[in-house]
Amino acid sequence: MKKLLTIMLCLLFLCAGCTDTMRKSADHAANAPVTAQDDRTTAATSAAAKTEPATSPYTKLPLLAARAVEPGDPQNTAGRKTQRLEHSFGVSDGNAPHEISVAAQNYFSEHGFPAIVYDGKAKEKVLYLTFDCGWENGCTGDILDVLKEKNVPAAFFCTLDHIRSSPELIARMIREGHIVGNHSTTHPDFSTLSRTRMAQELLTLENELRTQFGYFSPYFRFPMGAYNENALELIGELGYTAVFWSAAYEDWDTEQQRGADYAFDTVTARLHPGAILLLHSVSVDNALALGRIIDHARAQGYTFRPLTAFGN
């Protein structure tokens, strides 16, 4: 009997030891690193949970972060000139840029200002076609149709109102390879603005392009062609080039349109090698005459280039 009791006590002790071992094994398993198979499963689950980078609903391009840039020397303690200047191009004569345009380009180049008026370095007869877009009245789509048909690059300088009111047109410009340039947020006279306000005018519009279209370009056009040396320095600091013009005409007044023939005759008479041509996208005359203008220019030996090819 005594022997039997001893055997039973041993069995109870062994069972207790097994139970404790099983509990410890379970605890260890719960805290152990994942196995290779578990790791693959976790990685797959994690990858599936990741989302693609946000893209523009208009262009499908990856969105860009907004840029927050404070202008250097916001109080203009360096004393940069603030006298108002207004761009003048003169009417070209004899298939050459007017002397006013030549003088303006020389002035910008000699002083190191980031501004272009016409391309005097091009070895061929080249033209740069640009449009100012302050608002939309239904002509821009027709202009884009002509440019696509003729395979001509252009630059469209847009205000914030135009970008926000016509996002599909802006997206089309980008998709079809045109430049969308900065024409400021509210179209003010830059010669009257502080350096901080000028920076806000440029960057508010730039950030709209970045965060809504995944796009921006380093080209700026002063509203009304009004500027000063302080403004020229500021836009250069922000990484922009000011795009002026050497051929244009009074086409912006929608109440004073004179017909497609007038637009054709006026524009083609003012073409010259290296010209930056300014047209306004609100002009019905321009939309109707554009195809003929392009054909005429090409027949005269001109080729159309994007601003990115300027000076080459």
Image: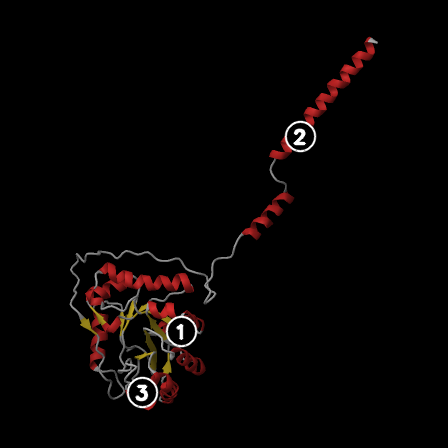
Q: Which callout, 3 or 2, points at the residue further toward the start of the chain?
A: 2
| 18 horizontally vs 94: left or right | right
Q: Which callout, 1 or 2, points at the residue further toward the start of the chain?
A: 2
Q: Quadrant of residue 171?
A: bottom left
Secondary structure category for the residue under label 2: helix
Q: Quadrant of residue 160?
A: bottom left
**Alpha-carbon neighbours of circle 2 within 10 Å: few (<14), some, or many (≥20)?**
few
- Which quadrant is home to the N terminus? top right
Q: Position of residue 219 (x, y in %)?
A: 32, 69
Q: Is residue 95 visible in the rendered structure shown here?
A: yes
Q: Which callout, 3 or 1, points at the residue further toward the start of the chain?
A: 1
Name, please, the residue furthest toward the front. Answer: 255
- Residue 178 is marked as 1
Q: Quadrant of residue 291?
A: bottom left
Q: Position of residue 138 (x, y in %)?
A: 38, 78
| 227 horizontally vs 276: left or right | left
Secondary structure category for the residue under label 3: helix
- Which quadrant is home to the C terminus? bottom left
- Residue 25 is marked as 2
Q: Nearer the viewer, mark 3 or mark 2?
A: 3
